[in-house]
Image: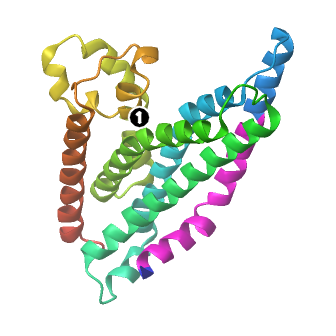
């Protein structure tokens, strides 16, 4: 718990979590302004749950991006600055240190995701029309959407952990991890017509698009069973983290 708590403190003060929170507030404010502008042009009130659903579809991507930045700073950044040596001289195993960094920053990213989901939903309920809608059902739908985003968040933060350990470079960690984040959906559209594509991890990364929003995103789910895809993705996450721990255990930091 001490390592996780320290990671939260370092992320908040050293990696500008407060700045990201401020930027997200600006994005939410911009989304409200855009919806109000659309509402005035259409001449009919926008519904609160529409605003909340659009927000929860879009904003988690920014949390994933920042989650990768957090991991890059926590691992590769400390390799570059040499501060990781101060951790390794303590009577704590390397496995515990690496797990604390990954899990601590993952919890922080999940906390930020939940906070953004709650805030955007509440703002939507305050600003836009709630006529004919159930507030309880809205919160249920919104949190269900957020839960479908979690497997992708966990995958990218695990991948960033491995790349950070391998490269010891903050810039390379961010660039390499961002590549599938930006292009996996496009690649999936091209290869989804082939039967073998369902056995590629890239087909399972966008879990929300595959199993919650597949009709809108024009994506055919790789497996019929959502749980099968989740298990496939989870197995890759475990392998990635094991590989990261093996590399970190042997990594020379002198």
Q: Which residues are magenta?
A: 3-29
Query: Residue at 15% of width from left, 28% of height from top?
Result: 199
- Location of mark 1 (residue): 181
From the image, give the main secondary structure of the stretch colored magenta. helix
Residue 228 shows in the view: yes
Residue 254 shows in the view: no
Query: Residue at 44% of width from left, 82% of height from top?
Result: 2
Q: Quadrant of residue 212?
A: top left
Q: Quadrant of residue 186?
A: top left
- Asked whether residue 37 is drawn in magenta, I would say no
List x then y, in percent, for residue 142.
Answer: 55, 38
Q: Tell which of 59 and 250 is nearer to you.
A: 59
Residue 128 in the figure: left or right of residue 80? right
- Asked whether residue 28 is drawn in magenta, I would say yes
List x then y, in percent, for residue 88.
Answer: 32, 81
List x then y, in percent, for residue 54.
Answer: 61, 28
9 lies above or below 232: below
Q: Tell which of 216 and 9 is nearer to you.
A: 216
């Amino acid at each position: 718990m001490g390592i996780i708590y320290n990671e939260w403190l370092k992320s908040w003060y050293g990696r500008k979590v407060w700045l990201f929170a401020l930027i997200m507030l600006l994005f939410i404010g911009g989304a409200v302004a855009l919806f109000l502008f659309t509402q005035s042009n259409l001449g009919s009130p926008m519904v609160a749950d529409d605003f909340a659903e659009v927000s929860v579809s879009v904003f988690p991507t920014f949390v994933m991006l920042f989650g990768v930045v957090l991991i890059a700073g926590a691992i590769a950044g400390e390799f570059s600055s040499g501060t990781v040596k101060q951790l390794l001289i303590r009577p704590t195993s390397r496995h515990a240190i690496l797990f604390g960094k990954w899990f601590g920053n993952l919890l922080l990213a999940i906390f930020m995701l939940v906070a953004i989901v709650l805030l955007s939903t509440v703002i939507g309920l305050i600003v836009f029309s709630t006529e004919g809608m159930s507030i309880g059902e809205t919160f249920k739908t919104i949190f269900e959407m957020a839960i479908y985003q979690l497997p992708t968040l966990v995958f990218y933060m695990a991948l960033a952990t491995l790349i950070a350990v391998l490269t010891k470079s903050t810039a390379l960690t961010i660039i390499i991890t961002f590549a599938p984040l930006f292009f996996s959906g496009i690649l999936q559209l091209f290869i989804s017509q082939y039967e073998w594509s369902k056995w590629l991890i890239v087909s399972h990364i966008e879990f929300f698009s595959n199993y919650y929003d597949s009709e809108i995103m024009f994506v055919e789910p790789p497996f019929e069973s959502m749980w099968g895809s989740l298990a496939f993705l989870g197995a890759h996450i475990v392998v990635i983290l094991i590989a990261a721990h093996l590399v970190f255990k042997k990594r020379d930091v002198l």
